[in-house]
Amino acid sequence: MSYVAPTSIIEPQNQGRSMTLISAPSRRFRSVIAAAALLAATAFPALAGSQVARRLYSLPSSSDPRVSLPDTVSPRVKTASVLGHLGGETQLTGMSLVLKPTDAQAAALQQLLADQQNPSSPKYHQWLTPQTFGEQFGLSDADLAIVKDWLTSKGFTVDDVAPSRNRIVFSGTASAVESAFSTTLQRFHRSNQDYFENSTAITLPQSLAGVVSGITGISSYHIQPIQKSPLVTPKYTAGSGSHYLVPWDFRQIFGMNTLISQGYDGTGIKIGVIGQSTVTSAQLTYFQQLTGQTQKLPTMVLVPNTGTAGQLSATDEQESELDLEYASGSAPGAQVLFIYTGIGTNANPNNGVFDAMIYAINQNLAPILTLSYGACESDATSYANTVLEPVLAQASSQGQTILVSSGDWGATACETPDNNGNVTVAQGGLSVSYPASSPNVTAVGGTTLTGTTSTYWSSSNNSYGGSAVGYIPETAWNDSTASALSASGGGASALFGKPSWQTGTGVLADGHRDLPDVAFPSSPQTNGYLVCVVGTYQCTNGTTFGGSSGTYVFGGTSAAAPNFAAMLAIVEQANGGTALGNINSRLYTFAAGSSASSIFHDITSGNNIVTCKGGTTGCSSTNAATNGTMGYSAGTGFDMVTGLGSIDATGLSAGIKSSTSTGGKLTPNVSLSASNTTPAGGTTDLLTVAVSGTGSTPTGTAALSIDGTTVTTLTLASGGGTYTYTVPACTSTTTTTCTHTVIASYSGDSAYNAGTATITLTVASTATLTSIALTPATPTLTVTSGSTGTDAITIASTGFAGTVSFKASTTANLTIGCYNLPSVTVASGASVQSTLTVYTSTANCTSASATSLNTKLASSQPTHNPWQRGGMAVFAAGLMGAFFLRKRIRPAALLLVLLSAGVFSLSGCGGSSSSSSTSTSGTTTAAGSYPLTITATGVPSSGAASITATTTVTLVVQ
């Protein structure tokens, strides 16, 4: 596959642990691997010449135990109506495997990210490309070849390997997915939508757990959010005293016009706006005409393999049109890219904004990305850990700055709106939104402009439609009423610990990543944003906003994020065009410095407090029958409503210029050591930080973080300090060790710059590895059509004691055929047998003990069945749900499809075969060869989590 350069319009197109196997690969297999590696280097040139360590030496065997992945079944399957099994022939395109780094690679990446933001480091702002990222942190050529070969052996087609070598895109049928990943795909109905997704957990062979962390793209769940915006007369500064915002106003209020007057309008800088629906170019053109801009449409980048361009919903399109109009209008010289996914070939595309985000990062399309979607953080835990966080860290290493709106429901992000798209009373408890909560992004919250007099506004509009005089005082945004929650999202993350850079006045010592980081105007009720978007009151020409009755005014934190993206584009150009990367450490450093007042507008009034149901987490009322309140108030310095406050672009630009210079300071030597790098769980380990230099002894502090959470801040004495760490016990039953990444971050002083050091602690597991393995007595079972055949299946246990049940299935078109395979009980370390009986006539299949082998819809199914989707072109979209659109007074919600977990699911190896006959008539099985997959599910008598294993038997019917 070739990619069109991002400056062109792309047309629609149809921490892991190292694990090796004991046995060495055969000469024949080594030849296969060598050929596959050569093919990888030829088909994907970016993958050639890698020096990364190899971790795989053979395909997993059919006897490999399988691991059940947690949180891979969406909670919504419990409330949805089941319509039936998804047709096995349904074509799924654009699924992807997420590949994880080794522990050493993960630690090295964290060190690199720290060095890239340290002005005293030789790696400061030395950004990687996706290719160099892959060479350092991706999979080796040989390992990629094995994983690709495994996918091919399971009937999939490999469509692409990301240049960063951490993702493989593939396609195949629904039945292939079920067989390879030991799951079931069902059709559901929920919230006026028909969709499909997996109804059972995903599993994978244990031998591949060290290289694969997740799978995306096996759900088509979407929801069309309902948009509500106030209708106003089409004026900017109205005679009634009401005022509305256009891009010129935002630039004037926050110091951007000063830089523009100096020639810095964003020229040469790219901004990537992320979406999941096409936009109407006429609305963008009308908006530019109405706001005095040079007419320039964004570069449209349709993510390959996601289908054709189209409107997913009116609200999705309106969201993107708002983002594009203000990203381009507030940075008039920047090149804006609209990176979006298609809608597939029917009403169930399994792709969305997160896939567009991943593509923008893997292709390094723009140094600034802005996203106006998010998910309830508690629902996103598995997806964040195994899929998106590694990609967001990659973005940071490439110098990409990612801005994400913090949410529009105040101190809660886990609500389900009513039929009108509103939330009136919070019931989800104190919560925040992901990926806004990620330490790898900058979360953008909301404020409200409070100045209404002529001191702040002109009585008429200039040629750009602007009327703001200068900075206007702000308060925290909270427009919540009895009928709808509408306030700046913020609070403490339950998923991420306190980053080492999140310090300063107002920052709580709560051990949690807190958000937002910054905030900008977001109220649609007070000084909202004028737009041209599709809908009832869309702009019909370039002379007036809206139709004859008026226009829409939008607000929400999704209006704040693209405006901040525009500000950063201008600031980047003013600082030589160098990408800024993850700007959070720099923002918090500025806020603690002497120039803070020239950079930040500290918002000290207002709150994001909302009404909550009594008894819910964080609610002031403990009585379920009485509503209470929950949320946070703005205050001096950082707060969980407006973060560090809003920003003046001129001050920020000056601060960056000053911080880029080392000012003659010395570079310190920072070291971190442990008394034992392989401690036992439950013991203590002494960690020692030492900072030395060529001049005076360095002073100051060193923050010590473990696994991303700051555990202590040491005040250096004679250049050093120690911390006694109580090592958690490792009780993993699926891996032999647990690892912990320790980072020491030295703050610097008047003579020395900041610096960091990293080590990894490895803890042996004290738990017994548990597994079961299946071995058929006869790998090929030959049966005369109409008769019965048997095969003994041996179940061998390692550390497992409990009941084992079975499921047999085939991906072939076997319309007559059934089986019986009784459950058995096995003791730890023992072996038992169960007899597989296969029936090849309808007479025997009527028995109550017989279960159908068919996993495909028969060819007699109605041809208009919407689930038979041959040839659908889609891209990986494992996370399609739980997106909250971040604009509008009444934000709607999209539920999260969590399709990724700690590892991705694979099945046992073995060549694929197909039936020699696809006959669906008669009373006996048609002659042919049918591959059967036997899946065993073991439920431990101890009550622990279940485990699985698979094997294959080829059924030959004569």
Image (cartoon, grey):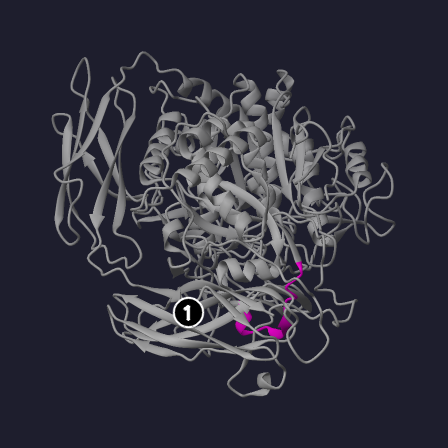
Look at the image and tell me in which quarter the N terminus lies: top right
Element type at mark 1:
strand
Task: Please state which of residues 39 and 780 is positioned toward the viewer in this rendering.
Answer: 780
Residue 131 picture location, percent across and down: 50, 28
Kind of residue sitting beneath label 1 = Ala
In the displayed structure image, the side of residue 286 where residue 130 appears, left or right: left
**Residue stretch in magenta:** 76-90
Height in image: 156 above or below 140? below
Residue 496 picture location, percent across and down: 37, 49
Task: Please state which of residues 606 and 264 is positioned toward the viewer in this rendering.
Answer: 264
Residue 585's image quarter? top left
In the displayed structure image, the side of residue 243 where residue 142 appears, left or right: left
Residue 799's image quarter? bottom left
Residue 775 picture location, percent across and down: 38, 65
Height in image: 73 above or below 31? below
Q: Is residue 530 magenta?
A: no
Task: Please state which of residues 672 and 269 is positioned toward the viewer in this rendering.
Answer: 672
In the displayed structure image, the side of residue 391 where residue 570 appears, left or right: right
Q: How many marks?
A: 1
Height in image: 680 above or below 396? below
Kindly identify which residue carries mark 1. 936
Look at the image and tell me in which quarter the C terminus lies: bottom right
Residue 848 picture location, percent across and down: 53, 88
Residue 282 seen: yes
